DNA sequence: ACACTCATGTAAGCTGTTACATGATTAA
DNA sequence: TTAATCATGTAACAGCTTACATGAGTGT
């Protein structure tokens, strides 16, 4: 409901849904994504796993490693899956941080394509609102206008505009081709969904 | 140093630098900017002001209102100004949240133009890094590729690209016209710095 | 009478951070 | 030997959130 947290909880559940893994594995995986979402240290991760365990959203199995420290492999439970689904599908509050959206995108592999479309659509509405609010801010020289604020507004506006463009492109792509089945999804998506190019 | 906090502290100091105001005033002001930065409730604001007071970064003066509850008007101190300046000029860690950048932009009115350029430049480097990392992620189908992750990466890439374009435009604009004096700044900036247009 | 805005505050709690501790194995 | 990677954890604390409390005035 609040959407003000980083949602680390659900990132972890999402990863465990893809495959069971240890706290350390999660840590390494998230380090690779650190430019998309903030990655936690052990001090956040392990206590979190303990909490999830107490809440019965995950289970553990200790696997002794050969010539390695033993690992504690965590798996998601039915309750965990439900909690994750609930969170992913729950509407994002309009001024939640950008992460809230990316995160759901990231964890949406369990998502139906229709659900994904709905999510993008919802985002579109919010960004559009956001954008016009910024445009208003720029047009009214009312509130203490200074160079910094002006720049910040213009910056926000530029990013909002770009995001709208992206959303429209993807929505069109997703709508043009009706749902395909699970097996094809992976392949097709990697072939078709590219648009922007690097530097 | 950490850059992991929301920096509310410095937003407040920045506002108080522009003009002395009460906790409630700050609350209202920030509510208007809620699409750019998250705005705190009274439960965050008042304790924060008390802390700033204890740290001698601000001072208070109680102003009894006529037919209104009395206000506590806070003003920034010399120490407060220094703290703010230090924070604004301190380098942003590469994977700090987007807010960290916008915030400094927002509070940069006390900033020299050269400083602003440097800040944009620094951001450019970071976003470029960010962008190529994302591009790499998209090109290697290595890590658990799924539709959601693919979309998230593409999304990040699109936004990074747009941001780079914006940064380049602004940097060019700022470099083309050498520093103008304080009085002209306000007027000129509002005339010249626009680029993106609304819906 | 009721609710709403102005205006300030407290208290409990969650999340996450840093810094530290442990202990084994592997590479310089 | 020293350092680094693997792997887990604890403890202290910062920051923020929600929910609540208070109290005066204003409008319906």
Image (tube, coloured by chain):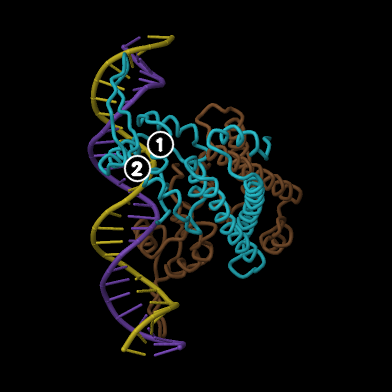
Chain colours: A brown, B cyan, C purple, D yellow
**Which circle marks residue B80 in the picture?**
2
Between the residue at mark 2 and the residue at mark 1, the CA separation in whole angstroms equals 9 Å
Please name the residue that numbered disc 1 is placed on.
B17
Residue A192 percent across, percent down from the top left: 74, 58
Element type at marker 2?
helix
- Split into 4 quadrants, where in the image is the C terminus of chain A? bottom right
Closest to the observer: A102 or B29?
Answer: B29
Which quadrant would residue A77 be assigned to in this image? bottom left
Q: Is residue A88 visible?
A: no
Residue B90 percent across, percent down from the top left: 44, 54
- Split into 4 quadrants, where in the image is the N terminus of chain A? top left
Q: Label 2: few (<14), some or many (≥20) within 10 Å?
A: many
**Identity of the residue furthest to the right in this view:** A176
> Disc 2 vs disc 1: Cβ atoms closer than 8 Å?
yes
Q: Chain of mark 2?
A: B
Q: Label 1: few (<14), some or many (≥20) within 10 Å?
A: many
Q: Is residue B66 above or below residue A21?
A: above
Q: Earlier in the sequence, mark 2 or mark 1?
A: 1
């Amino acid at each position: 409901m609040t959407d003000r947290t980083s949602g680390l909880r659900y990132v972890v559940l999402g990863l465990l849904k893809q495959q069971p893994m240890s706290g350390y594995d999660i840590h390494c995986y998230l380090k690779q994504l650190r430019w998309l979402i903030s990655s936690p240290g052990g001090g956040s991760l392990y206590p979190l796993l303990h909490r999830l365990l107490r809440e019965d959203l995950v289970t553990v199995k200790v696997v002794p490693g050969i010539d390695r420290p033993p690992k504690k492999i965590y798996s998601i439970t039915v309750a965990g899956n439900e909690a994750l689904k609930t969170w992913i599908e729950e509407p994002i509050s309009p001024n939640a941080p950008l992460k809230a959206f990316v995160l759901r995108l990231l964890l949406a592999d369990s998502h139906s394509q229709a659900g994904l479309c709905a999510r993008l659509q919802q985002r579109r509405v919010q960004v559009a609102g956001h954008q016009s609010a910024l445009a208003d801010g720029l047009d009214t020289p009312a509130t203490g206008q200074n160079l910094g604020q002006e720049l910040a507004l213009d910056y926000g506006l530029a990013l909002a505009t770009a995001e709208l463009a992206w959303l429209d492109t993807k929505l069109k792509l997703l709508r043009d081709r009706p749902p395909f089945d699970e097996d094809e999804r992976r392949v097709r998506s990697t072939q078709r969904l590219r648009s922007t190019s690097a530097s």
